[in-house]
């Protein structure tokens, strides 16, 4: 369980990670789509996606070689983390 809280702490320590994970909890999206929906810079979204992906919370849904139209989705671990964040009312 402490690993779960470590991941929760990682996500909620960045408004960008919170926004990206929250957006992907609704449906898969591209970085530019997330940026538009959440009113964020694409560079911030890309950095957040990279970190969330490294921790297994989001996944790339298209081939790795694709450079345009990269669609990301939330993983089961990401969904569990997001649900825990919401259940514990950890968002400002």
Image (cartoon, grey):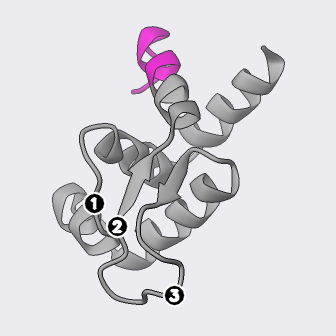
Q: Which residue position is annotated with label 1?
A: 29
Assess disc 3: are there few (<14), some (14-19) or many (≥20) residues with their C-alpha within 10 Å of its C-alpha: few
Magenta stretch contains residue 18: no
Say above or below: 29 vs 62.
above
Q: Tell me the residue that label 2 is attached to.
A: 71
Q: Distance between the residues labelled 1 and 3?
A: 17 Å
Pick whichever of labels 1 and 3 is earlier in the sequence.
1
**Which image quarter: residue 2?**
top right
Provide the secondary structure element on which disc 1 rests.
Answer: loop
The tag on residue 13 is: none
Using residue 84 as the reference point, say whether residue 2 is left or right of it: right
Q: What element carries label 3?
A: loop
The residue depicted at 29 percent of the width and 53 percent of the height is 28
Name the image quarter holding residue 43. bottom left
Which portion, as a residue range, is magenta? Answer: 83-92
The quadrant of the picture occupied by the N terminus is: top right
The answer to whether mark 1 and mark 2 are in CB contact below 8 A is yes
Whole-percent x and y of residue 70?
Answer: 37, 75
- Judged by depth in the image, the label closer to the viewer, 1 or 3, is 3
Which circle's residue, 1 or 2, is located before the other in the chain? 1
In the figure, 13 relative to 80: above or below?
A: below
Q: Are marks 1 and 3 in contact (CB under 8 Å)?
A: no
Q: What element carries label 2?
A: loop
Choose top left, top right, bottom left or bottom right for residue 27: top left
Q: In which quarter of the image is the C terminus?
A: top left
How far across and down, in percent of the image, does residue 72 sit?
Answer: 40, 60
Label 2 Cα crowd, 10 Å radius (few <14 / some 14-19 / many 20+): some
Q: Nearer the viewer, residue 19 or 54?
A: 54
**Which label is found at residue 65?**
3
87 drawn magenta: yes
Seen from the viewer's position, the closer of residues 60 and 17 is 60
Residue at the limit of the structure toward the left, as seen here: 37
């Amino acid at each position: 369980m402490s690993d779960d809280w470590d991941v929760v702490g990682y996500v909620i320590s960045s408004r960008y990670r919170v926004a990206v994970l929250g957006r992907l909890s609704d449906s898969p999206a591209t970085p530019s789509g997330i940026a538009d929906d959440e009113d964020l810079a694409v560079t911030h979204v890309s950095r957040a996606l990279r970190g969330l992906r490294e921790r297994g919370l989001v996944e790339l849904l298209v081939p790795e070689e694709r450079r345009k139209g990269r669609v990301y989705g939330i993983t089961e671990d990401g969904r569990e983390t997001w649900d825990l964040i919401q259940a514990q009312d950890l968002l400002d």
